[in-house]
Image (cartoon, grey):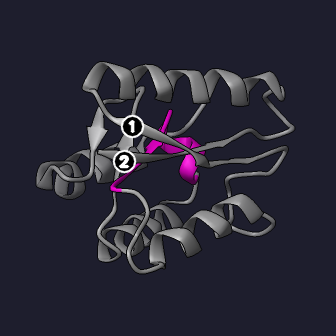
Amino acid sequence: MRCAIYARYSSDLQREKSLDDQIRNCRNMAEQKGWLVLEKHIYADKAVSGSSLEGRTQLTRMVAAAASTPCPFDYILIDDTSRLSRDRNDQTNLIADFQYAGTQLYFVSQSIDTADEQANDVVLPIHGIVPCT
């Protein structure tokens, strides 16, 4: 599997080093699965809230890359669901857009794979109602 990575930290609760930690976690998971991380498809938004999509230039670049034909990656690795979005509707719409483009997401910390129908129908919606800390 060809993989992109997306990382994000918020200036409120995290530090810039968090990006390195998130990317390392994603790389380790990819290595365990025998997946290939594409170096030119590592995206990281710095000091940007996950409560909306506003100002998330790297996420926007990744969405555009996924929508290109052919899509350059099969999976997007993200350390935690909260790194993609803290807004349930934004998260659902992003996942649907990526899947429409033929790309799945794997949330490393929670071992959630959107290729698994149960993840989309049960796990992510339930996870979305639990407050993020």
Determine which residue is flagged by label 2: 2
With respect to residue 61, does 9 lie above or below? above
In the image, taking residue 56 as reference, residue 24 lies left or right, namely left
Magenta stretch?
A: 74-85
Q: Do tag 2 and tag 1 residues touch (Cβ < 8 Å)? A: yes
Residue at image location 55% in from the left, 43% down from the top:
82
Q: Earlier in the sequence, mark 2 or mark 1?
A: 2
Residue at image location 32% in from the left, 34% down from the top:
35
Find numbered disc 2 in the image and state the secondary structure of the residue it sits on: strand
Does the magenta-highlighted stretch encompass residue 78? yes
Which quadrant of the rendered structure holds the C terminus? top right
Determine which residue is flagged by label 1: 36
Does the magenta-highlighted stretch encompass residue 3? no
Q: Position of residue 99 (x, y in %)?
A: 31, 68
Of residue 132 and residue 54, the one placed in the foreground of this image is 54
Q: Position of residue 70 (x, y in %)?
A: 38, 75
